[in-house]
Amino acid sequence: MSHDEMSGMDHSQMSHDEMPGMDHSQMSHDEMSDMDHMKMDHSEMNMDHHDMSHMDMSHGNMAGMDHMNMDHGDMDMDMAMPGGGHMHMSNFKQKFWVSLIAAVPVFVLSPFMGLHLPFQFTFPGSDWIVLILSTFLYIYGGEPFLSGAKAELKDKAPAMMTLIAMGISVAYIYSIYAFIANHFLSPQGHVMDFFWELASLIVIMLLGHWIEMNAVMSAGNALEKMAALLPGSAHVVDNGTTRAIPLSDLQEGATIQILAGEKIPADARIISGTSAVNEALVTGEAKAVEKKAGDTIIGGAVNGNGTLTATVTGTGENGYLAQVAKLVSEAQAEKSKAETMADHVSRWLFYAAMAVGLIAFFTWLAIDGLDTGLERMVTVLVIACPHSLGLAIPLVVARSTSLAATHGLLIRDRQALESAKNIDTILMDKTGTLTEGVFKVHTLAAFGDADEKTVLAEFAGLEQSSSHPLATGILDEAKAREVTPASAEDVQALQGVGLTGTVNGRTLAIVTAAYLDENQIVYDKAQFKTLAGAGNSVSYLIEDKTVRGLIAQGDEIKPAAKSFIAQLKKMGITPIMLTGDNQPAAEAVAAQLGGLEVRAELKPEDKARIVKETQAAGHTVMMVGDGINDAPSLASANIGVAIGAGTDVAIDSADVVLVKSDPQDILNFLTLGRATSRKMTQNLWWGAGYNILAIPLAAGVLAGVGIILSPAVGALVMSLSTVIVAINAMTLKMTA
């Protein structure tokens, strides 16, 4: 065991939570080798994301891992549409601008709900131009809403798309009737058309959806980047010869050879060879695990210095990495089914408008004939068109995400803003969320005739050629104490132990407690238990078989973490720490934070399971994490929050990203979420409130006392409600 792997109570284990100084999002997978203390150069740890575009991995299925056929279908700034469809943001943008250009002549040449505005005019044949452009708008601009309505109705869940589709369809069909009646049937009087209303509704709805998508752009690259952990080929051993084959051709049962420093191409069982395999980018356990014949290895992990020969036990969708991807995909699919407040309001408005419209039709049919009954019904259905309702949420989202960005929060899913007010449980990873992510020297001790300054100089001398987080912590301590590192020569790694070298003609070594035990070297075991139990990594400096000194290092609690936990409790939110760490180390951190529930020694599937169990118990859950092992739980939670310094996979699985990695920003998000939710509710009441009043009046419920809402007046009130909704959205502030 190398000196690099020491952590907490158990020096044979080192979880991702105990590797705070290491930015895995910037580390080349091939360069993690065996985490050897002398061979790891952090200056070379740059992940090449260009290699990530050659995977074939649809959502929920990584079968084959064909590196030549990556399906990006729904993975690039797509907006989930009702019924499971997707609409690319650029499509909405294009449809909006094209529709706006087509709508301008309609606005100029067609009456505004029966009113002729000062800028409007007509000329012979202008009505035909309006008809042609309106038909184009209905077919081209209205396509996403008509398709969305079809999907909603297929799911028996009419909502915003159905309401919009109803409005534009009624406006278009009745306007066609009006055009035919006015030109060919020559009825008594003039039948009013709704071409103006049709054009304005389509343009405003396209604008609203574009605004929303632009404010909440979501790349959705989590699965792609997870697949990128696998290499493009594998070395297959066949009849004594070794040849490279594409990963997609690799079969279970094949014998493969993994060279030093290479990524492991698939799950396998070792036949021969020994090595230290780093599984950090796959499991979150940032340690080099000693592997020998008979042990299993995980596809996507990185081999150390040894060469391994192994039998493939799992490829494609059967592999460990594919199972993690499947967890992420399934969780994202489940979350995408969640309904928004606007959907609920739109559904009820749809039913209300249909019911009132039909009642008005039959009532006025009996009172004043077919023409009046038809006009009243159409007026009701057209007035129900959700102009303000369509902008109520997008405008608030645009304002909210803009405010969030200026405060270090990136909102990737607007549903997170609506769910924030309901959060009652926060599950969080330890390192990077509650701790600084940097090892610092907590204890320095010298024994025998040595003094602390000399011991620190010797430690630093051996460590100065390494850029490992533990080495960095020692060198920083030497600099802080103004201690010059001793001159060290012939520094070499002790495989699985630590370092050795010559300092001032004496052979010194940095080793672990396990090494001391194995070599029966005397040391203070009670002191070790105390330091390790506090979550420290303990390193010993020895000469021959005598301990000269020790250094205990640990991650620092973030300054705001303790108050963050306290404020969560005051808000009635239960904080729970989920970590791959051993229990004693996790509990030590929890104690420093003022006490919170701890779930330790967890795998990715364990975290996702705990999220679902907590939700099943009736809680609304936020998950905060930064590693690939957090990705499934981030996707499963009601709100997933990724630490900005974490891995790309975690970030792309999350709904919210903390750019500054400050836990206080979680409180800011909760505050903003609640304020945003209030604005959304207010805007929905303004948008729906207009309909609640206008629909009955348009139906003629007060016709007996001479009050009836004409289409023109209805249009003016509709415009006023849209303005109010816009102003209200702009007054959103990042306050409680």
Image (cartoon, grey):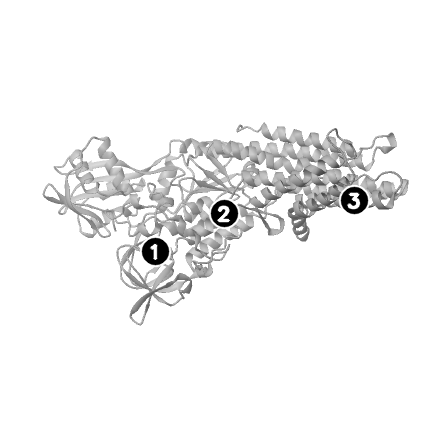
Task: Residue type at mark 1: give it.
Answer: Lys
Considering the numbered disc 2 on the image, is that residue within a helix, a strand or a loop? loop
- Taking depth in this image into account, of 545 and 241 the one nearest to the observer is 241
**Marks 3 and 2, Cα distance to the nearest angstrom?**
42 Å
Task: Residue type at mark 3: give it.
Answer: Tyr
- Taking depth in this image into account, of 699 and 5 the one nearest to the observer is 699
> How many marks on residues?
3
Residue 265: where, in percent of width, then height? 37, 59
Mark 2 surroundings within 10 Å by alpha-carbon count, few (fewer than 14), some (14 through 19), many (20 or more): many
Mark 3 surroundings within 10 Å by alpha-carbon count, few (fewer than 14), some (14 through 19), many (20 or more): many
Where is the C terminus found, in terms of image quarters? top right
Q: Earlier in the sequence, mark 1 or mark 3?
A: 3
Q: Earlier in the sequence, mark 1 or mark 2?
A: 2
* Image side of residue 346 versus residue 735, left or right: right
- Taking depth in this image into account, of 467 and 609 the one nearest to the observer is 467
Q: Is residue 384 visible?
A: no
Q: Is residue 125 visible?
A: yes
Task: Residue type at mark 2: give it.
Answer: Gly
Q: Quadrant of residue 506?
A: top left
* Image side of residue 706 versus residue 388, left or right: right
Does residue 429 sit above or below 686 in this rendering? below
Please, which residue is most extreme toward the front here?
A: 124
Q: Which residue in the protein does label 3 denote? A: 174
Q: Which residue in the protein does label 2 denote? A: 220
CB under 8 Å between discs 1 and 2:
no
Considering the numbered disc 1 on the image, is that residue within a helix, a strand or a loop? loop
Q: Earlier in the sequence, mark 3 or mark 2?
A: 3
Q: Which residue in the protein does label 1 denote? A: 263
**Marks 1 and 2, Cα distance to the nearest angstrom?**
24 Å
- Taking depth in this image into account, of 416 and 401 the one nearest to the observer is 401
Does residue 408 sit above or below 249 in this rendering? above
